[in-house]
Amino acid sequence: MGMGKKVKKESESPPKDVFDPLLIESKAPATVVLMLSSPENEVLAKACDALYKFASKGDENKVTLLGLGALEHLYKLLSHEDPLVRRNAIMVFGIMSSNNDVKKLLSELDVINLLISQLAPEEDVVIHEFATLCLAHMAVEYTTKVKIFEQGGLEPLIRLLGSPDPDVTKNSLECIYLLAQDFQNRAAVRELNVIPSLLGLLESEYPAIQSLSLQTLEAVSKDRETRILLRENKGLDCLLNILENNELNDLHGETLAVLGNCLEDVHTLQEIQLTGGLKKLVSFLEVSTVPDIQKNAAKAITKAAYDSEIRKILHWEEVEKFLLSLLETNNDEVQVAASQAISAMCENIDSKCILGLQGIPQLVQLLSSDNEEVKEAVVTALTNLTTASPRNISVVAEAEGIVPLMKTLNAQRDGAVSNAIAVLTNLSLQEPSRVSIQSHGIMSALVGPLRSTNSQVQSRAAFAVAAFGCDAGARAELRNVGGLGPLVELLRSKNEEVRRNACWAVMVCGSDGLTAVELCRLGALDILEEINLSTKHKNKFSEAALEKLLDNNLSQKYSRMGYLSSSNIITNGFYDCGQIKHGGKFLSLEELSKQELTDRRAIIFINAKPQEVTVVEKTQEVSPSVSGRSSREKSRKGKGKKEEEKPKEVIQVTPIIPEEIKLENSPWLPPPDFTLMDYINDASKTILPLTTTREQVVALAQFVADKMGGAVEREQLHNFCWELDMSEIEFELKSNIVPIGKIKRGTFYHRALLFKVIADRIGIGCSLVRGKYNRAWNEVKLVEYSSKGHLLPPQEYIVDVMFEPGCLLKQGSAKADRYKFI
């Protein structure tokens, strides 16, 4: 673009007897920029004027002037003594400052102080216009705002709000609006009494000024002190008058934004209510069909409803009807804002009832929206509506909300997923809903959320597992779909809530043996032990989860803790593999069965359950070495006909075994221990009928000792060669795993285990404690009577099954200690 216009001052024609002024012509911007170094004021003024016209033609020209170094020359002219030169220089600055590159250079030149100095009352109105324009463009940047504030720019800007020139007013207003976005500036604006000026500008004939005034009021009224000033200056009446004026409908949205801030103040809201303004406001909103107004109104209600007193006032004005009507609009943004407002109003119990009964069916329908933001807002509202509200929970179920809620678990937004889980968890409190949710595969659907990287989703997913995991079918489903793995991983979370809920879920899921064993295999026990060692991470659920897992996986509990209480009932499948070292891996019985024969301590296992026909068919799939370990128990004399049939079922399997060796992936099943079955049957017949627990304990101790090699003299203990017998059994079975019934010469830990197994079967309460050097013992509590026949507190005894079988050694006595340690 050229600069072909002649640069001359516009004035009246000079007298005829005076020479015409010299005409300066140039088509090259670079030449005009050079003129900025001229010592002649007239040349400087005309050069600035030419540059202003050139820069006004487009952003490209501004960049050109920037590259030619025009700003550096113009900067020097801002403080020129000639008013015309200074005015024209500021005009160029103002027009060029809209360019981002120009703004960066202006910040480096530090022009803020010079621009503020041009706002003095005695300066020309044109200087005011372009100085404020430049400041408004630059005030977008935070650093510039700080400089304007620190260098006292607010006061002259507020003063210029009263300028007769609308451009000066608009530019000053825009600059103040930008400054008011920061908290410290809002306080300064308030102290300079800007409210009367802003309210006065609402009556301006220029819509742009009215709009900017409302935007600035919205910014400053975020502070409670400013809202008080607004109320004292009758600002609420001004705002309500704008809403009542249909000719000003283009300002209604911004007016509502200011009123929305006012609604957050209880005293302001009460004043609006007392003067009838709140009823007018609600009536206006109910008839409005403008989406922006509806959206802003709902947002204002959301912000205001965080105060309990304000929620009461809004409820009295029946704001719920308005919010419910917004759900019917065909605008996503309005639906989102309405749902958020419903969430906020739910904190009022009366509003919760109204919104639940009438709003839940509408919200359930909106769950099918294609808009992800709508889904999130809607399901969040449902979370708040159903929390601690059985009635609303029933309404969701009646509105057939379970299926769309299950689908929402696959939503793209984490907020939608986490709240869908929360609603389903709330619904689980009612049995019919819980059963229905489980029938739709809730545990399978929770696997994805358990693997989420969002902590809220993780937390709520784990909480849901705890809620639904009380059902055995649900636990089996979670186990089968691979959900236990990600659940165990959540135990490692650094988020306290996630970790606590994961512990809770593990505690619930660990209430059955199969799930407890799987959780232990996945490392849950190690993680829980680590958590419980930390005073920072430990919680009641982590302690309970560890205890629950061990109580439902007694083999591992005894291996880790060396103790089983009287409530820990040993069942089929239990095995004692010795004390596991800290950090060592606990192997399953199946894994142990695959190990080669070693000279290490034998694994003693318990299985007093005969295999039925269906089980026998599975046993055929085991390798010959494992199946051979059952030893069939050929010499079972003196038994009834029914018992004699059991070995026949097993014997029939033997010829088929070689054909089934190829089935490597078949599940391993331990062979039954028929000898142990006989022990239990004999004890039931001979010991159970005894009248007192003491008699039963003594008789059982003698029974166990008799089956394990009889009494051993303490001095001859070293000659009691039980190790040799164990080696022969292992060699015979070609396995490290030995059924307890095969042991005929047992030491302390064999006898104590057999005592506990039989005692649990016939109802004698006893504990099993592992000691050092192959020691183990049983503890029982017996009730005694005084000489006068009074019932005394239970006394704890150690049961001797080794030296004097049936002798009861009082806990803490020298004899008891000697039995345990010597």
Image (spheres, grey):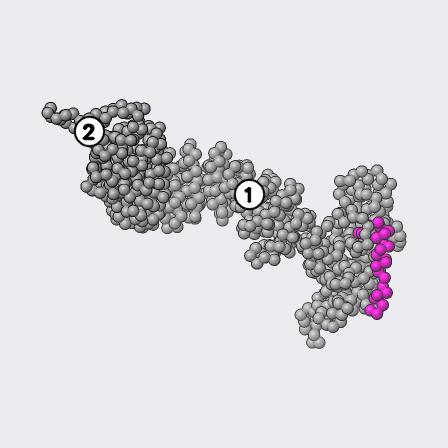
Decide: is 722 above or below 241. below
For the view shown, which residue lies furthest in the bottom direction? Answer: 787
Residue shown at 83%/66% (left/top)?
717
| Residue 809 visible in the current orientation | no
Question: Residue 718 at what x, y percent from top left?
Answer: 84, 65
Residue shown at 76%/41% (left/top)?
666
Residue type, mark 2 in image:
Lys
Queried whether the magenta region covers residue 716, the answer comes back as yes
The CA span between labels 2 and 1 is: 69 Å
Q: Which residues are magenta?
A: 714-737
Describe residue 417's horizontal placement relative to residue 104 as left or right: right
Question: Residue 648 at what x, y percent from top left?
Answer: 86, 46
Q: Quadrant of the N terminus?
A: top left
Q: Nearer the viewer, residue 411 or 488?
A: 488
Question: Residue 566 at what x, y percent from top left?
Answer: 70, 60
Residue type, mark 1 in image:
Thr
Q: Nearer the viewer, residue 158 or 232?
A: 158
Q: Which residue is mark 1?
A: 453
Q: Quadrant of residue 557?
A: bottom right
Describe residue 183's horizontal placement relative to residue 640 as left or right: left
| Residue 370 visible in the current orientation | yes
Q: Quadrant of residue 135?
A: top left
